[in-house]
Amino acid sequence: MLGIWRGVRLRQNPPRPAILQFHGNGIINMESVYSRFGCVTSSPPMQQKGLENVTVSDVLLSKGEEKVGSWLWCRVDDAVINAMKNMATNNIGSLVVLKPEGHIAGVVTERDCLKKIIAKGRSPVYTQVGEIMTDERNLMTVTSDMNILHAMRIMTENHIRHVPVIDGKVVGMISMVDVVRAVMEQQSGELKRLNDYIRGEYY
């Protein structure tokens, strides 16, 4: 009887998944991990318009980046440690790097920090972002009116996970997670329309 009673209570009050917090004690906040890889997102669903009509601008809008300056950046002469803290605080994997006059100088990512600082035993306190970033001369970029599939192909073929969006000036940043999420949302919408058609909900 005790086992049955426990089963009934569990059905009425299913246990909530544990949320592990990070307080410097080595425990990871799993909600942040899931959010980072697109498993959980607070972004509003993108309008269903078909993949051939989805642009980079649509992705930026779905991320809330329609406001100029809402993307995050740092300066070439910033210490790497500050860029790392910036990325960690905002749960992002890359930053646009700007020159003193405000033009784009490159992009720095968490992978740059791992490969060029941690792996080589360099000090993030005394190393500047400009020393480890991907320079503008080697930087792949996209425009806001570019089709999302074209942007995805550029990122895939060049093995990059983050690209700045430039329309004469930097207007935002998209990641491969953003692109994949956009594609999945559109495909799920198209699949729903096909299922509705099969069930006879379309005339």
Image (cartoon, rainbow, N blue to C red):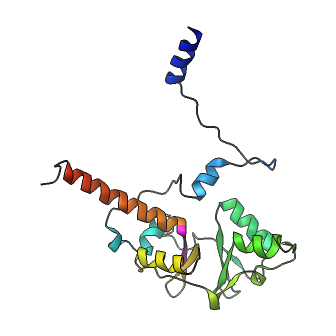
Which residue corresponds to the image point at 62% horizontal and 48% vertical from the top-left?
31
**Quarter of the picture holding the N terminus:** top right
Relative height, residue 89 to residue 142 (above, below): above
Q: Quadrant of residue 50?
A: bottom left
Magenta residues span 171-176
Q: Is residue 47 in the magenta section?
A: no
The image shows residue 169 at horizontal and vertical percentages of 54, 85
The image shows residue 87 at horizontal and vertical percentages of 69, 65
Can you see residue 79? no
Which residue corresponds to the image point at 41% horizontal and 57% vertical from the top-left?
45
Can you see residue 114? yes
The image shows residue 195 at horizontal and vertical percentages of 25, 52
Q: Residue furthest bottom?
A: 137
**Quarter of the picture holding the C terminus:** bottom left
Q: Residue furthest left?
A: 203
The image shows residue 137 at horizontal and vertical percentages of 63, 91
Which residue corresponds to the image point at 63% horizontal and 52% vertical from the top-left?
32
Q: Nearer the viewer, residue 123 or 67?
A: 123
Which residue corresponds to the image point at 60% horizontal and 37% vertical from the top-left?
17
Please give left or right for residue 128 compared with residue 19 in the image.
right
